[in-house]
Image (cartoon, helix red, strand yellow):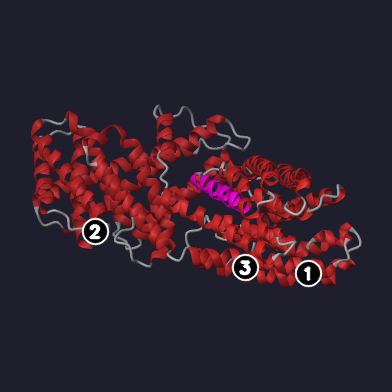
Amino acid sequence: MASWPHARQWLFSLKAFAAAMLALYIALYFGLPRPYWAMATVYFVSHPLTGATRSKAAYRVAGTVLGATAAVVTVPQLVNMPIVLLGAISLWIVVLVYLSLLQRSPRSYVFLLAAYTLPIVALPAVMQPGQIFDIAVARIEEIVIGIVCAAMVGSIVFPAKVAPALRDRIRIWLDDAAAWANDIVSANPRANAGRHRLAADMLALDQLIVQLSFDTESELTLQHARALRARMSGLMPILSALENVLQAQRAADDDSAHVALTRTAAHLHGQFSKLMQTCETLQHGIGDRPAGPLPDDAVSDDQAEQAAAYHDHAMLLFGAVSAGLAVFCAGLLWIFSGWEDGGGPVAVASIASCFFATIDEPRPVARTFLRWSAACLLIASFYLFLVIPHAQTFETLAAMLSVPYLGIGMLIQRPGFNLIAMLLSVNTASFSNVQSVYDTNFLGIFNTSLANAAAMLFAPVWAVLARPFGAHVAAHRLLRASWQDLAHAATWRAADIHSRLGARMLDRLGQLMPRLGATRGRLASDGFTELQIGYCTLALQRALPSLPPSARKPIRRVLSIVARHFRARVKAGHVVPVPLPLHQWLDTSIDQVMALRTDSQQMADVLSALVVLRLTMQSHEKND
């Protein structure tokens, strides 16, 4: 059950509404043709954290200018060839949406804004190409006014800094990691839920760290955050390995195996305690109280993390192409219908299509969006015919608009509703068409509102029809990509890129977690098994050159069999049985390392990797 909004959420909604009304007043004062774009833009860029608003604002201005410039260049050249113009706009959307999906930082807004700014400017101008420059300038002015108002109000009125929010979120994450460790030690069955939550929350932390660079914080704070993120990612494979080892230790009835498991458990527990202590120290360095010098390898860790982002290019391109085709088909309906004013609704459909391209599972979002859009149309119609005609002053208009927009401001802050809230801000503004305060052509305005409603209906219906497979296929492709990386990690050639490969596995795990619920248990793994195998093979690769020959030979055989096994999985496209010789060579390798009778850190790492790999592959085989 949803909790009642607290004071901070009400404050943000009031700030966003105040910025929206300021933007609307300025746009009306200067007589801009679409003042509602200024109002809606405020909700596009507003965020409860000031740094996040600034990051959105800077890149959205750049994207708007880029898209408007493309419209000025394109329309005069192709205005007499409407289908060719429509094809050029659709191709532009495909390329720019694809580039935006490749970004996981505020830079994505440059490409996303450029993608739908072109149709916003170009399509309504087809009937008056000589005014394309004026229309482009007006769109830029409207959107920039909204961006500047949102950034100014957010920075002046009770600004909310990113660093304290990030520090609190990291504190919660570390507490969850400690709770997971306690569940593991006490054999609590809730341990799986804990690790899934940690992996999913890591992507949200990444977004906050990116936004931190736009806040008024020192460079040292940002460096502490990035160094902490790199070490937090190492906690998950350690805890996952410890869980497997302790489970096996409780069931072990062989003295030799029990000794190896005990040594491995002690080693992993020591690694966890040391890493948690480092994370606690770095966490205190985020904000106004720096925690001293950074670890020596902090910069290299951060570079490895940034270089290791995984992208499923085929799925991203499919989403971008579906958005481009949606706009092209909507435009064909407009052209062949001969509707003179149909460019505006097609432009509205292009906005929704671009946003739906970012969603793996469009069906539930489409249902929610359609319900809210219908509600917006009813509310806007009520405003249009019964409320706005009585708004003879701007103050009265602002008071009347406060009800729907304060609600949208509250919706922005709810997890999973941000996209809905942004689209509804355009819906409500375009349906209400606030410049009708000075325009008595209500029949024409009502027809336009119905056309915009149909355009908004078109986008989610298209998304559902064009992408019926949902998140299950995306999740399966992530697992298959993990198998490919495991085959590479188990080869000698992969030894020099272990940091990047390990970070990519963690990044892929974070992408997999939100999709697991949509798969309804149809996947063979939740991704942690592949992560664990990858970390074990990479640890063995790092240690292999310095091992004595007696241990080096069986470990090479282990790595060779692991590589062949996962290459076979990739080729088959599904799970295949684990080769029996793998268990034999793993047992031999464990015996050889135990026989060395050395307490060095390197030998402890090797023994831990071998034991965990043995248990993980055995568990993997049972699950298959």
> How far is disc 3 from disc 2 in space, using C-alphas?
41 Å
| Rendering quarter of residue 472 | bottom left
Which percent across, then down, holds residue 512? 40, 55
Looking at the image, do the residues carrying marks 3 and 2 touch, with CB atoms under 8 Å apart?
no
Which percent across, then down, holds residue 313? 42, 48
Q: Amino acid at mark 2?
A: Val
Can residue 605 be seen in the rendering of this structure? no
Q: Is residue 449 left or right of residue 214?
A: right
Can residue 471 be seen in the rendering of this structure? yes
Q: Which mark is residue 446?
A: 1
Q: Nearer the viewer, residue 291 or 406?
A: 406
Read off the magenta span: 86-102
Which percent across, then down, holds residue 146? 74, 48
Residue mark closest to the camera, 2 vs 1: 1
Q: Amino acid at mark 1?
A: Phe
Q: Tag 1 or tag 2, which sits nearer the N-term?
A: 1
Q: Which residue matches tag 2? A: 575
- The verdict on residue 87 being magenta is yes
Q: Is label 2 in a helix, a strand or a loop?
A: loop
Q: Which residue matches tag 3? A: 457
